[in-house]
Amino acid sequence: MIKVENVIKNYGSVEALKGVSFEVEKGQLYGLIGPDGSGKTSLFRILTSLLIPTGGKASVKGFDTVKDYKSIRKIVGYMPEHFSLYMDLTVEENLQFFATVFNTTVEENYHLIEDIYKMLEPFKDRRAGALSGGMKQKLALSCALIHKPDVLLLDEPTTGVDPVSRKEFWDMLRKLKDTGLTTLVSTPFMDDAELCDEVALIQNGNILTIDTPANVAAKYPHKLWKVETENNYKTLKALDNFEEKISAFSFGHSVHLATNDNVPEKAIREHLLKSNIKVDKIEPIKASIEDVFMELMR
């Protein structure tokens, strides 16, 4: 459904994409996972025919993003990174406008957005600029779906919204997947990756790995420990001198420490105690996609 072949995008001397390749199958919920500045938005703009690649090629449902841009714009629903609807129009007016642009009506395709729009309906007369972040997100998704697209492209749709709205949004994406809609979504949140059928991890314009979320996590090559102490910064500094350390990163209120398989917990605990660090808990854990991402970057 989406095919990206060795796509390169340069902005002068800046290489935003360095030969990116992947494929999204029909009906997949596919995640492009990476931090800000990794090249996600450039790729989305190429797929929506808003940018021409410097090299390589991309296609959506067999249509080339450069040669067949008119066809692509008819079959793609696009939700850009930043809210881009008309702030001075109401919820209802925005929806009617986008339906008219695509030569359809809200009534004709209402079944596609019914579950989403029910949450918006109490605010249908409110201007889009006065909506909360979560409601803006739902309105943008409704407008992207109202012309019954074959492919949905969502560029960081949950950035800047509260955790409840973020969960609701992913629940909506899973329901849309059940209808057979093909969706490519980009996000900097590694835990979002677990909700996708397949993911591509991207950093500095390069694809680091492509696989199912479970397989990506299973590729972590080291023993991983969760270390809880009174101070992450002091713990990381102390672990700099731990001979068995492969890597160590701060994760919330703990440190994830990677070692070889034969390193015992006792060795870690004793090293930290020698550095006058109070240890609350040390336990082996399974790697997450974020752990794999940090390892690939390292």
Image (spheres, helix red, strand yellow):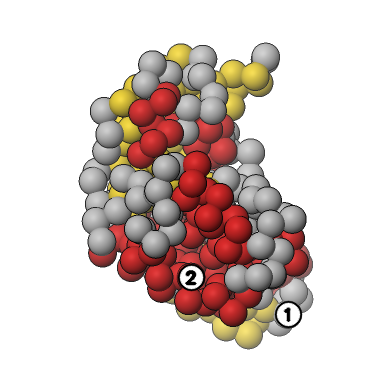
Q: What is the total number of numbered labels drawn onto the structure image?
A: 2
Specify the label residue 119 is tagged with: none
Q: Could you say where residue 196 lies in the image, as x and y percent from the top left?
A: 36, 58
Viewed as shown, does residue 24 lie left or right of 247?
left
- Decide which of tag 1 and tag 2 comes sooner along the chain: 2
- Depth check: 13 or 147 in front? 147
The residue under the point 50% across, 37% down is 44
Mark 1: few/some/many CA within 10 Å (<14, 14-19, 20+):
few
Residue at horizontal 61 percent and vertical 64 percent from the top: 91
Image quadrant assignment for residue 231:
bottom right
Q: Is residue 122 left or right of residue 76?
A: right
Q: Nearer the viewer, residue 188 or 264?
A: 188
| Three-letter residue code for mark 2 | Tyr
According to the picture, the residue beneath numbered tag 1 turns out to be 230
Q: Locate residue 110 relative to residue 139 in the image: left or right.
A: left
Q: Quadrant of residue 262?
A: bottom left
| Residue 4 in view in this figure | no
Q: Cα distance, mark 1 to mark 2?
A: 47 Å
Above or below: residue 151 compared with residue 107: above
Q: Which residue is mark 2?
A: 117
Residue 135 visible in the current orientation: yes
Q: Where is residue 218 drawn, in percent x and y? A: 32, 58
Can you say whether 296 is above or below 261 in the image? above
Give neighbour class at mark 2: few <14, some 14-19, many 20+ (Cα, 10 Å).
many
